[in-house]
Image (cartoon, rainbow, N blue to C red):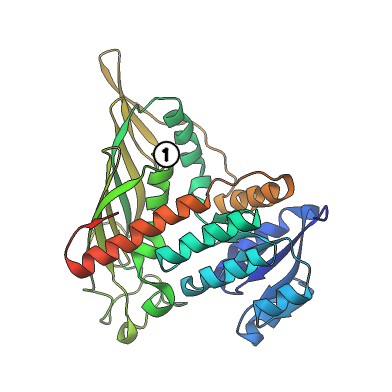
Amino acid sequence: MSETLRIGIIGAGGIATGEHIPNYLNCGNKIKIVAIADVVEERVKHVAEEYNIPHYFTDYEDMFQKVEIDAVSVCTPNKFHAPATIAALQAGCHVLCEKPPAMKIEEAEQMAREAEKAKKILTYGFHFRHKPEVEVLKRFVDGGELGEIYAARVLAIRRRGIPGWGVFTNKELQGGGPLIDIGVHMLDTALYLMDYPIPDTVFGVTYQKIGNRKGVGLSGDWDWDNFSVEDMARGMITFKNGASILLETAFAANVEKQKEMNVKLMGDHGGADVFPLNIYQEKHHTLTDTTPKFLPKKGNHELEIERFVDACLTGGQPLSTPHQGVIVQQIINAIYQSAETGKPVQL
């Protein structure tokens, strides 16, 4: 590998131009973005010109054949995560793939196998792990301050936050709605803080009550006539170690807050709300609440990209692993399966 990490981008949409490309450029002379691929030629040409990327393609296979690349960001709709990631790994590249890992469990498992076979890094865009609240709380958890974490609540709810752009309401391309888009972030955050226990049984329900009709859009007008995903999902996950998670996620729900993204942990020595960070304990016969006075200000997307680049250059391992990606995919798909069948799913 060259001293400068040669980066390729697959997908020239909002997550690529809003987060990945700018934050790679923040890494200075550690990287060079050498190529970008997207099926829409006009879009990929425009992005390449805007960011001075020397090569652009409408087929990522052509990109791998014609340009030397060390690492790739996969920024496509969910349907294309697995094939793009597998192609990149087989081309000898490290991969940062946006969340969720894939559409199916089998795809996530194949992605993990290909990474092991290629001996390359595969990590996922679970960027909430890099938020300062999560990093601070993880140190408290690892230090035993919460004891055994046996219960958690996961919340990713918007009052009227159905995306009015992109393909977020297209089930064929995304695989689902809020569960697979925003719920997955808080689910991963909870699992990460709980040291990724092995799931046992999953029960879930989904609803489509608001998204398939015209309404107020706080994130732009969505295509309600072709709304094919759930607008709310709820689930309960139990784990082999006896712990459990209650999950609730929605693009649209008749609730008070415009948006709530949070994880609430309960352990036998303490509990915590993550956003904002508060830690609840009993010490010296007194109930105490602990709130950090100062938190670092560096952005979570910036840290995610920075740490991926450093791992590629040094041979380290980013926070998110392929095995954890498989577990997340198992839980997501099990919630959808349970909602469809009306029965719990044993993993």
Q: How many marks?
A: 1
Q: Position of residue 106 (x, y in %)?
A: 43, 65
Residue 46 in view: no
- Graded by Cα atoms within 10 Å as few (under 14), some (14 to 19) or many (20 or more), the crowding at tag 1 reads few
Which residue is tagged 1?
A: 195
Left or right for 100, reference 157:
right
Q: Quadrant of residue 288?
A: top left
Q: Position of residue 310 (x, y in %)?
A: 70, 47
Q: Position of residue 170 (x, y in %)?
A: 39, 79
Q: Residue furthest left?
A: 342
> What kind of residue is marked 1?
Asp
Question: For the residue labelled by badge 1, is the local secondary structure a helix, a strand or a loop?
Answer: loop
Q: Residue furthest top?
A: 284
Left or right for 149, reference 108:
left
The correct choice, above or below, for 243 with respect to 160 in the image is: above
Front-lying residue, 138 or 28: 138
Q: Position of residue 62 (x, y in %)?
A: 71, 79
Residue drawn at x 39%, y 79% is 172
If the image is split into quadrants, where does the C terminus sit? bottom left
